[in-house]
Amino acid sequence: MGRFHRHDDGTVHSHDHEHTHGDVHDHAHGDHDHDHIGDHSGYETGSERIEVLERIFDENDAAAARNRAALDGAGVVAVNVMSSPGAGKTALLERTLADLGAHVRFGIVEGDIETSLDADRLDGHGAQISLLNTGNGFGGECHLDAPMVHRALHGLDLDALDVVLIENVGNLVCPAEFDTGAHHRAMVASVTEGEDKPLKYPVMFRSVDVVVVNKIDLLPHLDFDLDLFLANVRAVNPTARIILTSARTGEGLDEWEGWLSSLAPSTVDAR
Ligand code: MG
């Protein structure tokens, strides 16, 4: 099965890389009017396929609502943390747990296709950790969806937590398309990735509340144009909070950690 995704307007958009059909894509809109769906020459059952995809998203959204209700019922705020592989999500979360762990009761949903490598790195800071390998029963998916997060939340005692951080699978495309039930979305973008990424992956950059620009300690060694990158972020997301950090040196982490702390003010103040 090829991959698929949904735009902000609810449009389902599918690609099937097993077929060659140039830049022709299938579109179906939320009103279920399929008359204007594009060329299906690459598919035997195009409109049925789109209906299946819409149902998958509908089921995901229902599961996300249940996740959110469970989190709300326990007074827990969840943040879906996304990025491409290697941008520094785990390093950022390691520092976050070390710095805030005494004040905020963190739960971690660690999403990876395989291995417990990142979960192991985050261990030892007092956080509850629930590992979800998508290669274990979820087809090795390139993202976390709401049913996966539902499974993972069963591994956490929500009543004993303030904030759940969901470390999504490293991928700049798929994770943005699935509501996990988290209240907030943040992404980590490394300065090693290039200034063009907000324009090339607008769905991700548009989907988040916070853009953490990480590895800024490397700026003197790169040709990266930070101003151009920030302008590109603003072009696709005028309102996201932008935080410049180095998870390695600790620069800028106070702002990120201040934002996280502010998500659960009552519990943080009480401790
Ligand atoms: Mg990681």
Image (spheres, rainbow, N blue to C red):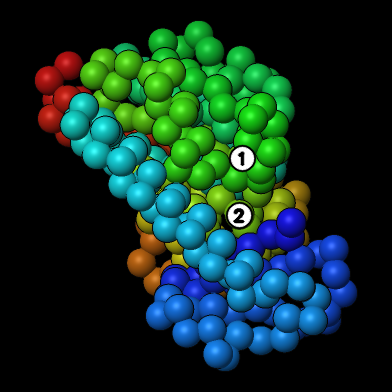
Q: Name which quarter of the figure residue 42 lies in.
A: bottom right
For numbered disc 1, what is the local secondary structure? loop
Q: Examine the rendering and report whether any part of residue 102 can be seen.
A: yes
Camera-side residue: 215 or 75?
75
Camera-side residue: 269 or 152?
152
User: From what the image shows, is residue 119 above or below residue 210?
Assistant: above
Q: What residue is at 50 percent from the left and 64 percent from the top?
A: 54
Amino acid type of disc 1? Answer: Val
User: From what the image shows, is residue 186 above or below residue 36?
Assistant: above
Q: Quadrant of the N terminus?
A: bottom right
Q: Name which quarter of the figure residue 263 lies in.
A: top left
Q: What residue is at 47 percent from the left and 84 percent from the top?
A: 33
Q: What residue is at 24 percent from the left and 39 percent from the top?
A: 69
Whole-Å distance between the Cαs marked 1 and 2?
A: 9 Å
Camera-side residue: 148 or 93?
148
Is 103 positioned to the left or the right of 165 in the image? Answer: left
Residue 56: percent from left, percent from top:
51, 55
Q: Quadrant of the C terminus?
A: top left
Disc ID at residue 174: 2
Residue 266: percent from left, percent from top:
13, 30
Residue 258: percent from left, percent from top:
31, 37
Is 3 positioned to the left or the right of 152 in the image? Answer: right
Camera-side residue: 181 or 225?
181
Disc ID at residue 159: none
Look at mark 1 in the image and give the residue it sits on. 169
Amino acid type of disc 2? Answer: Cys
Mark 1 in CB contact with mark 2 (< 8 angstroms): yes
